[in-house]
Image (cartoon, coloured by chain):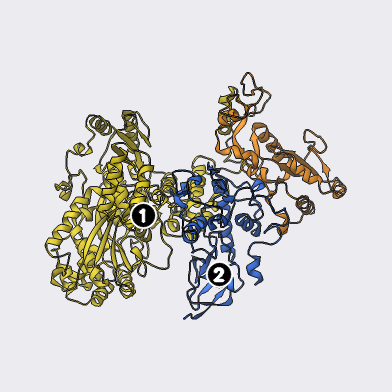
Amino acid sequence: MSETLASAIREIAQACGNDRSRMMDIVEAVQAKFGCVSSEAMDLIAKQVSTHRVEVESVVSFYAFLSEQPKGKVVIRLCDDIIDEMKGSESVAEAFRQELGIDFGQTTPDGVITLEKTPCIGMCDQAPAALINNEVITYLSGDMAREIVRKLKKDPDPKKLIGRLGDGNNAHDLVRSMVHNNIRLAGEVVFSTMASGAGLKNALAMTPQEVIRDVKTARLRGRGGAGFPTGMKWDFTRQAPGDKKYVLCNADEGEPGTFKDRVILTEKADMMFEGMAVAGYAIGADTGVVYLRGEYAYLRALLEDALAKRRNAGLLGNDVMGKKGFRFDIRIQMGAGAYICGEETALISSCEGLRGDPKNRPPFPAQKGYLGCPTVVNNVETFCKVARILEHGPGWFAKMGSEGSSGTKLLSISGDCAKPGVYEVPFGIKVREVLDLCGAEDTAAVQVGGPSGQMIGMNQFGDPICYEHLATGGSVMVFNSSRDVLKIARKFMEFFVEESCGFCTPCRVGNVLLKEKLDDIINGKGAAGDLDYLESLGATVKAASRCGLGQTSPNPIVTTIKNFRSAYEAKIKAPAEEGLQPTFDIHAALSTAESIAGRKSVHT
Amino acid sequence: MAKPKVATTSLAGCFGCHMSLLDIDERILKLVELVDFDKSPVDDIKEFTGRCAVGLIEGGCANEENVRVLQDFRRHCDVLISVGDCAINGGIPAMRNGIALMECLQEAYSTDHRLGPKVHNPDNVIPNDPELPLLLDKVYPCHEVVKIDYHLPGCPPPADTLWEALVALLSDKPVALPYELIKYD
Amino acid sequence: MSNTITFTIDGVEVTGQSGQTIMEAADAAGIYIPRLCALEELAPHGSCRVCTVMVNGRPQAACTQPIAEGMVVENETEQLLAIRRDIIDMLFVEGNHFCMFCEKSGNCELQALAYRFGIAAPRFPYLFPKRDIDATHPDIFIDRNRCILCGRCVRASRDIDGKNVFEFVGRGFDKRVAVNAEANLADTDAAVTDEAVNVCPTGALLKKRVGYAIPVGQRKYDHKPIGSDIEKK
């Protein structure tokens, strides 16, 4: 075994050029082959790439899809977000537990199947869903879960679980998944036909500066959520000193409730690659990297195929489209289950083979990004927009949308609505119009922008979705009047606690404290003053955290207090001035001692 | 006019904070001019005789009796002060907080040498007389059990800290301690 | 060639050199900005966030933010003091800080900051995590109950000692400092002469057999608040 491990690791590391910065590829390959990155494996990897063992452990321990402890040949990861919960994931969970005879976080005694929960896997439009190894199983039910376990017990090959295939490229031989695109509204930018090379050809006919000028004229802003002007970012990177520059594509779509990039990657990857090539030309980069979230590994072969086709067509490689001296190629970097890696500097860290810790800014990626070189990081959708802007001109694009938010936006709509799925709408669309489009009824609350965005109530349904009012990277979750906003907020806080990288104090500790207090309130242990406590603590976390995660993670609480204050107030009792603190539960505190002593407390 | 009353107690503490109170030396004479002591180990009054202006709590809550006494103090005192680190954060007794209760008891009483130190306990019993108060799952800081108005840290708080705070409270002045009187050791 | 940069901290004009951080320039000007992870001899880390200041109205870490001409920095505002106090409180409740028997008491920077802020008790509930102690090494021990994840030992070992004995593992609330061995410090090449052993702001990483050497009353922060040395300049 040891000999096998040693030779396998040697091979894996050599295939990555024994390059420490390719650590993600190395540990992912070891994990895939051996079901874990064992202590012994860490030593071997460290030797092979000339680093320290603890550096390997540091990486392995960071990502949810990597583990030092052995996992089963089959890992079932049930999606554990609020939408899946609303669609019945608890009964699916119960079925898995019963049928496997193990709890979440455990592996069957024969070592074959591991059961886990995982945050949003980008399938809210077909929830409940689970990842079984790299296969996606959608529209789950308790019966299906039992059936799945029975099949896996007979044949632990998750590929054989896929019967009915999804639409479009989901049915492609290289994908063969049961995922559905659910494109409900095809707009004219992303979801219309574009010939390969149509945008790039126009770009290459211009100078790089002119390309950037066009992107600026189109007033394109980043589609990941933050909304930074794309042209300006490119300009900074172009002007930054350095021979080597990089274009990174953020395909680490992890904001709960977002799945529009999944659909782009399935149907419009070529358009995205084209946008990356345009960016490469504009900033003077010869390498692009797509950071693909581990949850979307099932799309990797399709993406590699699309890249190969572009290479064959002369759209990637040397002298792209005959443009002398313009060399550009793209590789795919797999993530391994860490929401934080959607933050651009954490994404860069991960690409460099490090823990997904965000970096200090300044320097910004435009000055010092991937491997210390000037780097542009843009979202999947942003690159698609770039390709179309170059194809049709900035005026065409800027005409769409609103003044400060030009163009269209892909929304991922899920929750209490008849038609969950992806909608390409012009910026400026009102929430109410969106709700009408997706067939939402009796809507009481809408989470715009995912957990890091805001939870709005009916009085804001007339507000437009755009950068200036309700910003979103795409997530729109719809909740009807039967839902409990406090429990939704708690689910989101659990998510942030789980996904905080732990680098800075306010995010690492503050989110735990926020969640605990919210738990108290939900459990009827709230006290007067708790809302002030939550608001002031939330303000500290937002102001003092180092990156966007902590700067927005209190939002589930802060925005529900703002917009649904009465829901909190209904839960909070009057203070018991002379009695016990509401958070102190004497019965719970004594129950262990009572059972050990075999007698009841005289106190209670 | 009757003098205001002060009550004190030691919960899961070591009486060190009470010793520190006695360390105010001759000022204790001034103190008894200012106040009467009610329920306190200092005068051995077991039950409250009436309403008190100030209650001084030493120690955190480790068992049900501690909780009962602390509640009693809250009911009878206008101002309740956590005195010392144990009252404020559980202190040394709270070192058991990361460990399951049964494990703690075994560590203390088991004659199995692998589990704990050797005690003369031939029948290998964990004491369980009905008179013994049941232990809480962990040691709680006092302010997590009842509302506490002031905290005077230290192990023990310096005598001067106790003096300054008491005098300020009894003369209706804000408790504002100088740098050298806030210490955690 | 270094250029002189002029900016203000709480309305006071400060001059610094281009390339300096706000903290460096403030130190030189005798203005103390509270900090825990920052240490002059180590590269800035930006993790504790105690040095959060407002720069032109936006929160930034003074230890990583470079100075710029005309920059308006706020340091001692009510809002910032509240934020810093919250962060100090967080660090106390996140770990198990038993000052009463800690070898570092009186010389501990976390404790000293709490003293400086006049904190009698944290406003957050104690989390009482289960953390471990590594006393395997003959001359050094790690008490993770006291670790505040500032990364000073990580940086010192890597950048000064050239050893990489320490590194962060895990994430979020489970993040901790691990050693470059399967489990124990004894199995690393850590030595008592390492600079890493000298930089811990708390009692998480200490030399054995030298605790409590300085009598109470003569320790670093017994009489003067942390930062006094900078403010005196």
| Chain that is yellow in the image | A
Q: Position of residue A355 (x, y in %)?
A: 39, 54
Residue A264 % position (x, y): 22, 56
What crowding class fits label 2: few (fewer than 14 Cα within 10 Å), some (14-19), or many (20 or more)? Answer: many
At x 15% / y 61%, what residue is drawn? A310
Q: Nearer the viewer, residue C19 or B147?
A: C19
Label 2 to label 1: alpha-carbon separation: 45 Å
Q: Which amino acid type is shown beneath numbered disc 1?
A: Ser
Residue A482's disc number: none
- Give the farthest residue toward the left: A313
- Chain of the residue where label 1 is placed in the rendered structure: A
Q: Can residue A363 be spotted in the picture?
A: yes
Query: Residue at horizontal 74%, vertical 42%?
Result: B16
Q: Nearer the viewer, residue A280 or A228?
A: A280
- The answer for which chain carries disc 2 is C
Quarter of the figure that contains the C terminus of chain A: top right
| Residue A579 percent location from the top left of the image | 64, 39
Name the residue rendered at 66%, 23% in the picture: B120
In this rendering, the answer to whether C169 lies above or below C26 is above
Q: Amino acid at mark 2?
A: Glu
* Residue at mark 1: A50
User: Which image quarter: residue A248?
Assistant: bottom left
Question: In this structure image, what is the colour of chain C?
Answer: blue
Q: Nearer the viewer, residue A382 or A274?
A: A274
Q: Position of residue A148 (x, y in %)?
A: 25, 33
Colour of chain B in the rendered structure image: orange
**Disc 2 vs disc 1: which is toward the camera?**
1
Can residue A34 be seen?
no
Circle number at residue C74: 2
